[in-house]
Image: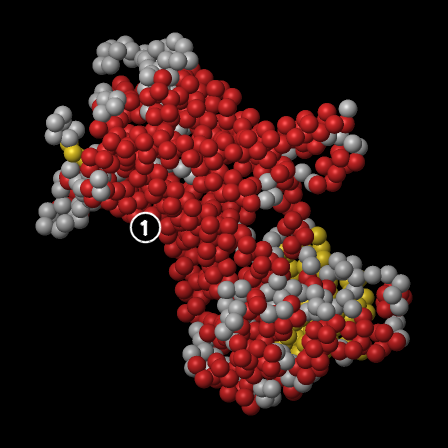
Amino acid sequence: MMETMTKTPLKDNYAEDVKYKLIAENITASYDGIVAVKNVSMKFRNKAVTALIGPSGCGKTTFLRCLNRMHELTKNATLTGRVLLDGEDLYSNKVDPIINRRKIGMVFQKPNPFPTMSIYDNVACGLKLNGVKDKKIIDEVVEGCLKMASLWNEVKGDLKKPGMSLSGGQQQRLCIARALAIQPEVLLMDEPASALDPIATQKIEEMIQELKKEYTIIIVTHNMQQATRISDYTGFMYLGDLVEFGETKQIFENPRNEITAKYVQGQFG
Amino acid sequence: MITVEQRAEFRKHFRYNVGRRLVLDKVVKCIVFLCVVVAVVPLVAILVNVFSNGAAALSWNFLTEIPGAVGSNDLGGIGPAIQGTLVLIGLSSLIGVPVGVMGGIFLSEYGNNRYGKTVRFFNDVLAEFPTIVIGVFTFILIVLTVGDFSVWAGSFALSIVMLPIVMRTTEESLKLVPVTYREAGYALGIRRWRVVFTIVLSGAKSGLVTGILLSVARIAGETAPLVFTILGSSQFIQGLDGPIDALPLRIWRLSSLPYDSSVTQGWGAAFVLIILVLSINIGVRYLFLRRKGQTLLKFKRLGSMS
Amino acid sequence: MKKGSSITDKIFKYVAIGAATYVLVIIVLIVINLTTGSAQVWQKEGISFLTGSDWNSVDGRESYGAAPYIMGTLVNAGIAMAIAIPLSFGIAMFLSELAPKLLRTPLAMVIELLAAIPSVVYGLWGLLVFRTYIQNWIEIPLHNLFGDQSIIFAGTPFGLDILTASIVLAIMIIPTIASISKEIMLAVPNSQREAAYMLGATKWEVFRIAVLPYSKSGLIGAIILGLGRAVGETMAVTMLIGNATGAAAFPSSLFGPGQTLSSIMANEFAEASQGGLHLAALIGIGLILFLLAFAINVIAHLLVAKVIKSHEGAVLA
């Protein structure tokens, strides 16, 4: 049954017909007995950047990890609610999580390239895992993804070097290329620039603008300037609740909620 | 940049094989589970056998009396062996603990250099040495020189087995004491040695005790070094310069005798030895891990929330 | 007053240095004593002490060669490792990746406690319990099936032989290798596992892609540490291996009696008279075992140290 599901041809224009790529409904999530996300519902527009902002500990990372079933890997994690990708429930019992995780790429807060693999293998391993055998295709994808992550020009001469030999910013872009290589439809980014210097951050932000043309991107960020620069929609979370969600411009210039206003004005957080 | 057309082309090459991969995943899990069962069954069988067979041999006389003559009806007991093991533990600790603790202090407080590294390295190597080699060494150094097997020789051999364990755990637990404690001591004008003895050692107390107890449990079961040093005896201790019996040695001797009664006694002695070793191990873990568990939990919390 | 105190500080420091140096002194003394103690046999036999297989302690016809015991040690430890490595890794993987929390702690504790059981108890159990099972369930059927023509199953299936000794040795080192490997696998940061999960990997694939390469050299270190233990293990092997001497101790059949470096020392020590060639030969065996174990442990510790370094690099990321 799972076989038949995966063999359904993926129509590339299908997503364009639908306004919302990813829909989270009534997500409540906890770990170690702490309820981190309380009944949050959100709809993520196709081919747009949605930013999740909020003070640390507000549950935005946990919420992000619910969107590709990564949260359940945390110890003592519980979760209720549904997440729909193109109308299909990710949490349905009939679907193994591995099928949907590969449709939803993820970039983590700290760069985590595989330390024993070369730059090339770091990008290629997801392809090999998912059954791509043609060496030519793998080469093409690796090159294309490294270009999209704007890392190609810096590493094209030494793809055989270990991924750990790169600088922090380059490692993070390598991780983005790795996530892009499996050809996901959604890209989740958990404060991808928090550990990076301003120049590397700028590179990643430019890249996100470019990626937006084809991907639905959800980015957790601590940095409000970053959210205004790169996102189309913004959700503000506080103490596990989704306080306000709307167009970025509206959230930052004309917030409807008092707490949102205080937060975006920098009065706490 | 990868275009939409290219992407569609790439996707054609993905052969996810989800079904096959999930089956492989299940197969591997089954194999792993099988490994656990295959490995745990004999290990548990040992405990069950020792406990059930050993308990049958236990009696007050068995624990306190000297062994009877081989093959006679009077079985006697393993009194000298128990006494010997306790005496050996005590005397070995007399050498092993102070030297080990001082060595550990050196490694943690003064050992951040080449010499410290060398000592640490060879200490680790010594900890994994075949203990029979230590037995032969002691035999040459003491038994051949003095001309007789003795309690001293056995204690010296066991202290070498014990030393690296005490040293390493002392170092590890001293390092866990925050530097600020030491600095606070220096700021008050307290001398370094007093800072180490009063502040650092007391802060590392539980780790220190753990290391010492674990090393005691280890030497309680060591047989090979004793073969060459204490010889074994069927009498209670006569003097520190004479031979002595010990539990593991007695088990070995009993196991090579062809009588059913000595087999029973062997199980009994093994039972006593295991109780000694395991109670130390379990006790230490219960006391120490409870604390460690709390810090571990803290780390886990930190790790799971970003 | 102040000066007096700084002298106590100095004394304290030197006492600490002295205690640390004691370890090095012991190791040097071990080398010296084993060398001088065995000088006699090296003088008489020369290199053939390593290569010869005669073992005769009868006065006037004395001749000693350690080759069968060196081989016996290697074969015995080799078979034990072949059994122990997969099982230990299975246990380690189960404990670090698969086990439900409820099972993890008690199982890890049982494994660790089993590492503490004295060798002589394993030997006793092997001799009195396990031996009969091996003999009746494995050796006799295999022997009947393949007969004396097959080399590795030839000989009388008596139960006290290389096979039994190796299996019990494997059982003994499994807790050691398994608990070290478990620690090493647990040291792999979760971010590595998550990266693999993100790519759509199954649990096994996560282990293969993220956990295994990351912990590879540590696991090799664990194996070599286990090998060091297997090579030096004395009592259980002595009680089970059947104790052949001389050329007969060359390991050929699994069902034949053998002898290892440590077991010949434990077995014959009581018969050797002081100052004689026999004793020197046994001490010489001790020297060989020392060098073998020393080399293995040095390699193991270098590897483990390397792991710690590379882990630090990776965690930094």
Q: Secondary structure at mark 1?
A: helix
Residue drawn at the location 63% of the way across and 80% of the way down: A150
Residue C90 vertical placement versus C287 (above, below): below
- With A230 as the anchor, is C125 left or right in this view? left
Query: Foreground: C307 or C59?
Result: C59
- With A232 as the anchor, is B31 left or right in this view? left
Which residue is denoted by mark 1 in the rendering? C82
- With B83 as the anchor, is A169 left or right in this view? right
One can see residue A160 in this view: yes
| Chain to which the residue tagged by mark 1 belongs | C
- With A57 as the anchor, is C112 left or right in this view? left
Residue A84, given in percent of the width and then of the height, sits at 63, 73
Q: Quadrant of residue B186?
A: top right
Residue drawn at the location 68% of the way across and 56% of the way down: B305
Q: Quadrant of residue A212?
A: bottom right
Residue drawn at the location 68% of the way across and 26% of the way down: C8
Query: Foreground: B193 or B176?
Result: B193
Residue type at the position of mark 1: Ala
One can see residue C92 in this view: no
Q: Which quarter of the image is occupied by the N terminus of chain C?
A: top right
Residue C259, given in percent of the width and then of the height, sits at 23, 37
Query: Foreground: A3 or C148?
Result: C148
- Colour setup of the view: secondary structure
